Image: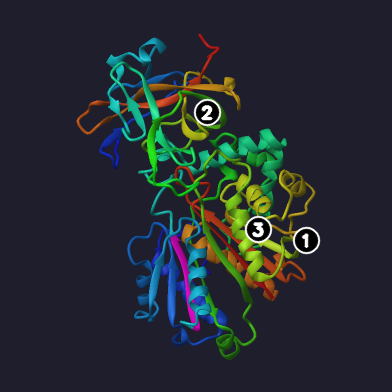
Amino acid sequence: MTRFGKHPDRDATDLGAEALLGAVADAGIDARVIEAAYCGHVFQGMVMGQRILAQVGLAGLPLSNVENACSSGATAIREASLAVRAGEHDVVVAVGAEHLTSQFRGALTPDPSDPEAAVGATMPGVYAMRARRYMEEFGMTREQLALIPVKNKMNATLNPLAHFHSSITVEDVLESRAIADPLRLHDCSPVTDGAAAVIVMSDSAAKKYANGRAVRLAASTLRSGSVDVEPTSMTFEPLTRDTAQDAYEKAGIGPEDVDFCEVHDCFSIAEVLRVEGLGLFPQGEYPGAVERGEANIGGRLPVNPSGGLLGKGHPLGGTGVAQVVELVRQLRGESGDRQIEGARVGLAHCRGGKAVGIEGAACTVQVLIR
Amino acid sequence: MQMHHPNGARRSLTCFDHHETLDLATYRPDGRLPFLLKEKDILAGSALGTSFRPGELEVRDDGTGNLLGSRCRSCGAHFFPVREACSGCLSGDLETVKFATEGTLYTYSVVRQSTPDFEVPYVLGYVDFPENVRIMGQIGGCEIDDIKIGMPMVLALEPFGEDDDGNPLTGYRFKPMEPNND
């Protein structure tokens, strides 16, 4: 993957090409063995994937561009894994890229046609409303919520590819600019440019090409949000729960087997909702667990050791792929100062998008096992 | 600030003065500072244009209006906005209904950063209606500090931008049922 951050002199094609070549080099394969490609992005215009492949000499492959909001990159990995599991291809590349700084500023919103966008819905506003409700229901304090960006930005200082490299304090969070009450600037993931790529192989191809470096993708599941027939809690995520349940079943594990996770912390409150939806912490208890250090690197269940979206950055299409890059590196023991000792099972969770009446638009869970 | 909207409308929005009083306010035609619209004027026909989104908000000549949605004739579930089929039982036998105008505030946030279409700050909230639907809208007509989860809210029709020809459009906000300001 590329360094995440602001890249004013580059574009998504360039970043995607760097990530793709990096994945090929990391896998130690000849690029000519790649049979197909899936490219995830949100705002990069038509045929971003074709532009990337043309840049690296791979034009001509079967290629699909994938848009699934913030789950676009993760969905590209799922599509790649389906192509391999179906027996259609043996070696497939999934790349996710976004040059977000050139596409928009300020708050991300639902599609302008959406009835909620028409009255002023913003993604920070929606998550802020969920945060307020969570505080009301479970007594989470504003200071407890601030500990999540503090943790993730600390982790990011250990990740050379992260957008941010400075640790922050609870006070920094509480004094940062108000975005949507009660959320402040440090509660929100940044506008980030970046790209990431992974090579997905069949078992037989891995034996042939991977030099023992492949990590098993035990599950890659996807769901989209359903329309509620009555209002449901906004402090719990059935969509996350159900997508995770699919993944646990496919991987033959339970939440108790997960050693660490990368979850979609687009906002501080989102990390709370994710890990509780995944069944990794009981509902209402994650803020306390963070306070006790349980989610730190070295804690009972490290959450977002890469820095997460809050610390590493959030280039929409690149995000889900970068999560899996982190899982692979952790499971190979290549994560340097942020290495989680003895990690065997890693989980990545992405979810993105908003449309009126549905709980969430697209949700993915990937389980990797060493 | 005004931008074209896919439905052909243009939006220019706010609901605040600079002291964070959530007045039921609208914009001057020049798009600058909001002026206050007295509550009794809100539902006066003279202040009303056509609905900013006719499929979702019905605005009548007498100054009243309702949010619109679907009711499943098969299982009784309600939906906002209008749907083609029921997500509960998959029946396609749906009728368009007018929702009640009173509900309960589920949660809210003061939005301080938004798109160029919307001037900040404004308050977003989700209101639960008796038909078992939850609808997002802006909140107006009260002080920010007086907003509480669980408070009863009522639908208020309000000027909500204008169309391409400069004709006023009517949208909606939610306001507390018994505002404690003057």
Kind of residue sitting beneath label 2: Pro
Between marks 3 and 2, how big is the CA–CA gap?
Answer: 41 Å
Residue A302 placed where, x, y %? 72, 59
Q: Nearer the viewer, residue B31 or A280?
A: A280
Q: Is residue A2 visible?
A: yes
Residue found 43% across the figure and 25% down from its top? B173
How crowded pointer 3 is (Cα within 10 Å; few <14, some 14-19, many 20+) is rated as many
Kindly check if marks 3 and 1 are in contact, taking CB atoms under 8 A apart as contact. Answer: no
Disc 2 target residue = B130
Element type where label 2 sits in the image: loop
Is residue A307 highlighted in magenta?
A: no
Going 72% across and 35% down the picture, which residue do you hit? Answer: A139
Q: Which mark is residue B36?
A: none
Quadrant for the C terminus of chain A in the image: bottom right
Mark-to-mark CA distance, 2 and 1: 49 Å
Residue flagged by tag 1: what amino acid is it?
Gly
Chain containing mark 2 = B
Element at label 1: loop
Q: Earlier in the sequence, mark 3 or mark 1?
A: 1
Q: Which residue is mark 3?
A: A304
Q: Position of residue B27 (x, y in %)?
A: 34, 23
Whether residue A354 is situated above or below residue B163 in the rendered picture:
below
Magenta range is A90-98
Number of the label disc, if any, that sits on residue A298: 1
Q: Is residue A165 visible?
A: no
